[in-house]
Every structure is written in C-alpha cells, then in structure tokens.
Amino acid sequence: MGQRLAGEGNESCMLNRFSRWYRCLLTGAMFLVFTVWGLFLSVVVFPLIYLAPMKRRRKQDVALAVLQRVFSWFGPISAALGGMRSFRVAGLEHLAPGQPCLIIANHPSLFDIVCLMGAVPRCGCIVKRGLWYNPVTAVSVRAAGLIPNDEAEALIAQCQASFAAGRSLVIFPEGTRSPHGGLHPFTRGAAQIALRCGVPVVPVFIHCDPPTLAKGEPWYRVPARAIDFWIHIAAPLAVPAEVAQKNGIPLQVRAFTKYLHDYYARKMARDAA
C-alpha cells in the first residue's frame, strides 16, 4: 500500500515537473512567435498599408484592425495549447457600439494589453514612449496610431482626436504592472483624460491566477500550474457628485483619481474574500 502511494506520488511529481517544463518552453515559443509576427507586420504588412491610397486615419484603422486580430489569437491559442488553464472575457455588453470610452484596468501581467486589445473592437491604447523606438514595436505602434504618454497637453489632444474618430482607449492607471494581489497608487492620467475629454470610464478587472510575468519577473519563471486568465468588463462609471462639485479641473482630477483607486481596491478585496 505504502509503495503504491509512493509510486503514485513520484508519478504525480514527474507529471507536474513535465507540465512546468512544457509551459516554460511554450512561453518562450509564444514570445518568439510574437517577435517574428511583429517583425513581419513591421517589414511587410504595415508598409503596404502605408503605401495604400487611403487617408492617414483610415490607414491607422486598418493597421489597428490587423494588430487586434493578431492579439485576439493569443488567449485562445494559449488555452488550447495548455499555457492557460482557462481564458475568459466577460462583460462586452457594457461597451456601447459606436460609443468610444476610456477603459481603465489593473495590470497583473505582461500580456494584459495583448488580451484586452484583442477582446475589444476599435480599441487603441496609451503606451510608453519607449515603445516608439523599440525595434520590434516601433513600426506597429506608429502604424496603428497608438498614443505615447507624452507631455499632458499633447496627450490630451491626441486622446480627443482618437475619441472623435470613434476609438476607445485603454490606460493602466497604475502606470506599471500591479503588485501580486494589490494595487500601486493611481497616477492622474486616467482622470485627466476622462474629465477633459468627457468620455465614459469603463473599468476592467483582470484576474491572473497564479500570478505570472509581473514586473521584474523573468519569462521562464512559470507558476506551479497553468493560469486562469479572466477579463471582466464592468459597467461604466459616472463621475460622482462630490468630484464634479470640486472647484476646477485640478481638484476634480485629484478627487476622481482617489475615487477610482478606492473603487478598484474595494472590488478586488471583495473578489479575494
């Protein structure tokens, strides 16, 4: 009896070790595939779109649609190959067709933006300026008209133009990846954009369990089991009366930033309980 249990334990241990090695190799392969795809899009597809006889905004829309189609494959393929135990997107009904909005989200892992942009149609994002000079991403972010997080006035003007063209935008209010099980303080960028551009704010909660690919975590350090990755899109948030009553945009931005952070902290604490 004891020998049989020991044998089963050894077999289970070997299977777990094999699963971990497989997922490590799969993660590396996915990074490689995305790098190759990024180079192919940058060298072949996006230059062809740039040369097409279309207006600049139309070219950006086509490039964004191509980018989103590629991104939309990531979650389902990862789940099918065993890199994820489950992949789920819920709440798309909260995104009104033809109504651009500002999508805010927590940021637990490296591939959040890939899965989120792949799930939401006509959705751009605000990216770090460094991506505009990265040899793998530079052509893609420029071709798709993604917005660099530049000086505030230029950023707001570009966001207004994007909303006017019917695009939604994603921003991570923490400005970096979230700590395990928590949140960093929110920067004021999301509140600035929402209040100055007058668009609905749609909160998104990203659940990655077990945590993986957090800030500073190497890609090969995979968790003990395959992850569950869920995106939950919640109902749009109205600007609270106590925020709207503040005297002037700077005070409203400060109050709205605190409101958004507290909203996320409460919701995530309830979900974790």
Image (cartoon, rainbow, N blue to C red):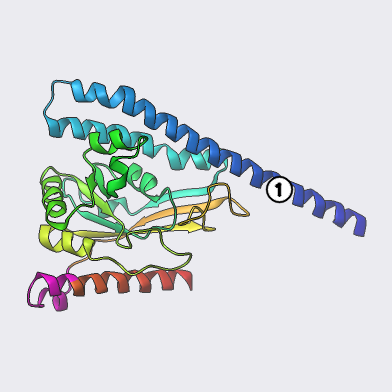
Which residue appears at 16% of the width and 52% of the height? 155
Query: Relative to residue 47, is residue 73 drawn left or right?
Result: right
Query: Relative to residue 166, is residue 170 drawn left or right?
Result: right
Q: How many marks?
A: 1
- Quadrant, the N terminus: bottom right
- Whether residue 203 is visible to the viewer of this picture, yes or no, is yes
Badge 1 element: helix
Rendering coords of residue 46 (x, y %): 27, 27
- Label 1 environment density (alpha carbons within 10 Å; few <14, some 14–19, many ≥20): some
- Whether residue 1 is visible to the viewer of this picture, yes or no, is no
53 inside magenta stretch: no
- Give the residue type at disc 1: Arg
244 inside magenta stretch: yes
Between 51 and 96, which is closer to the camera in this rendering?
51
Stretch in magenta: 239-253
Which of the 4 image quadrants contains residue 62? top left
Whether 261 is drawn above or below 222: the answer is: below
Rendering coords of residue 156 (x, y %): 13, 54
Residue at label 1?
Answer: 17
The secondary structure making up most of the magenta span is helix
Which of the 4 image quadrants contains residue 24? top right
Rendering coords of residue 83 (x, y %): 55, 44
Which residue appears at 25% of the width and 21% of the height? 48
Query: Relative to residue 265, is residue 241 drawn left or right?
Result: left
Q: Residue furthest left?
A: 247
Whether 26 is drawn above or below 151: the answer is: above
Rendering coords of residue 121 (x, y %): 27, 42
Which residue appears at 32% of the width and 22% of the height? 44
